[in-house]
Amino acid sequence: MQAFFGTFTNKIDAKGRLSVPAPFRVVIQSRGLTSVALHPSLFERCLDGAGRDRFENLTLKQEDSFRPGTRDEAADLIMGDLRDLALDGEGRIVLPDEFMASANLTDQAAFVGAGWKFQIWEPGLYAAAKQAKRDRVVKQNGSGS
């Protein structure tokens, strides 16, 4: 399976349209898909995305039960917020207003590859999160260079 990698910053127009980077579209289309599936991240101030197939696989791992405590609550939250957004003829998606608000997006978005998934960040928030992550990695590895 092809991976999402690299960082690309694109403009968001007044109608909430956002171009998905060509390398990310290639990954999606290689899976026979014509849309991206997005949800607000459970852990960071961004959106998590992938192909719909990633999230369909998530449901296969869940037991279908009416008993409490047998469900994966994180998966339930993801599936409840998940939106399958069609790519238009120019490779754009339209971000729902609530997604724009949850990720603090206004006029630009940074697509960040993360292997099996990608994230969409407000560029300033991404820069701060990236620096914090870099600092943790350096600290964990005991090196300052």
Image: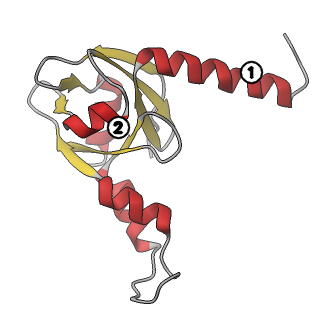
Q: CA distance from mark 2 to mark 1?
A: 30 Å
Residue at image mark 2: 27
Count of numbered circles on the image: 2
Q: From this viewpoint, is residue 109 visible?
A: yes
Query: Which residue is nearer to you in this view: 122 or 29?
Result: 122
**Mark 2: few/some/many CA within 10 Å (<14, 14-19, 20+):** some
Name the mark on residue 87: none
- Quadrant position of residue 118: top left
| In the image, farthest residue toward the right | 142
Residue at image mark 1: 135
Relative horizontal placement of residue 89, taking residue 3 as reference (left or right): left
The x and y percentages for residue 91 are 18, 28
The x and y percentages for residue 26 are 30, 33
The x and y percentages for residue 62 are 45, 75
Q: Is residue 2 above or below residue 11?
A: below
Secondary structure state at the residue bearing disc 2: helix
**Reading the chain from its start, which is encountered first: label 2 or label 1?**
2
- Quadrant position of residue 110: top left
Rendered residue at 48%/22% (across/down):
6
- The disc labelled 2 sits on which kind of residue? Val
Rendered residue at 46%/14% (across/down):
124
Rendered residue at 29%/24% (across/down):
22
Query: Which residue is nearer to you in this view: 112 or 40?
Result: 40
Rendered residue at 45%/89% (across/down):
67
